[in-house]
Image (cartoon, rainbow, N blue to C red):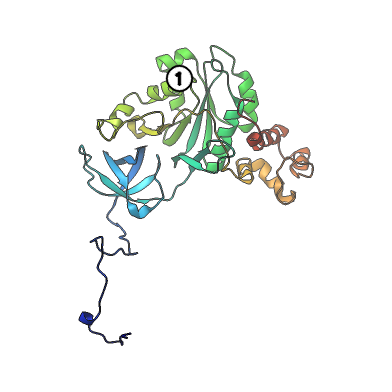
Amino acid sequence: MRRYGKHTDEDDIRSRPNRKGNRPRTHIRPKHEDAAEGFVLTVDRGRLTCLVEDTVVTAMKARELGRKAAVVGDRVALVGDLSGAKDTLARIVRIEERASVLRRTADDDDPYERVVVANADQLAIVTALADPEPRPRLIDRCLVAAFDGGLTPLLVLTKSDLASPDKMLELYGALDIPYVVTSREELETGGAADRVREHLAGKVTAFVGHSGVGKTTLVNALVPEGRRRITGHVNAVTGRGRHTTTSALALPLERAAGWVVDTPGVRSFGLAHVDPSRVINAFPDLEAGTADCPRACSHDEPDCALDRWVADGHADPARLYSLRRLLSTRERREGD
């Protein structure tokens, strides 16, 4: 067998041809330092609609990102055609670090988590007081996901002309959650939008709610022209620009006052991804009392130090009850 020394002639070395006819791959990736900053507005079948300065651009994810996916609310870096002209396509080469993430799973036994929206400041939980009946367990699950993901919750109670909000406000009063109560007439006339808008200034707010509670009506009233401006034209082949109930959509409020993220209607809100130990972070008045808890304490067992903490007057008993109700929500079905 022929052996080569250190100083061989290149012509004397045989190499196998590249059967695919392309250049060999390299692990060195470009840094794309000149990439433009963008904001993901919606995602539809592999195509992402992004806002680059004042231009709406259609883009796709670069292969170098691997399995990492961009979602609505992500801050991204783009290269390529950024003109926003019809049938042009840019490329997302980087996804910036996320400040918050709203996640959900199909159910509590599903290991696959779905990121609903990134970088949202608050979560508006829209629920009707009647027709359909309110689902407190679903609200609890949304609250847990908000606390776990770093979002501030906002409770929007609709159809107050059909039922009193007192029971719901008493149930969630100990959590100190900001809330807005509206009627059907206010939803139809736009008065509800005016009152909700006061809580949205300068923030990215994701809206969640199940069918029939008035979420879509409220979002359309908040941003009457935003949906049409962003979806623009629809390509009959690719469906680009099409927004359906299966995808979230970020809509700008007037005068750059914030963003509204309309999410698909939910029938369930699985919490398989949530570490219960992180929920306590949303209760600073109780968190200090966990220092003497047993290791791996669930905060709902006989030796939990929070009982003594509350008994000594450091926190309101209603707060502890609310915490334990939220922590146990994974063990209960949402309709219970």
Given residues 16 and 292, the one toward you in this image is 16
Percent position of residue 301, x then y: 76, 41
* Residue at position x 37%, y 53% in the image: 65
Percent position of residue 295, x then y: 72, 52
Given residues 134 and 308, the one toward you in this image is 134
* Residue at position x 23%, y 45% in the image: 82
Compared to 303, does 199 lie above or below? Answer: above
Q: Residue furthest front?
A: 1
Compared to 335, does 107 lie above or below? Answer: below
Q: Quadrant of the N terminus?
A: bottom left
Evaluate whether residue 145 shows in this view: yes
**Dot 1, how many residues are within 10 Å of its Cα: few (below 14), some (14-19), or many (20+)?**
many
Name the side, left or right, on which 104 lies relative to 35.
right
* Residue at position x 51%, y 42% in the image: 113
Compared to 119, does 65 lie above or below? Answer: below
Total number of numbered discs in the rendering: 1
Given residues 335 and 12, the one toward you in this image is 12
Q: Residue type at mark 1: give it.
A: Ala
Compared to 25, does 223 lie above or below? Answer: above
Evaluate whether residue 53 shows in this view: no
Name the side, left or right, on which 118 lies relative to 234.
right
Q: Quadrant of the C terminus?
A: top right
Percent position of residue 293, x then y: 74, 48
Name the side, left or right, on which 298 lies relative to 21.
right
Secondary structure of the residue carrying numbered label 1: helix
Q: Which residue is mark 1?
A: 192
Rendered image quadrant of residue 26:
bottom left
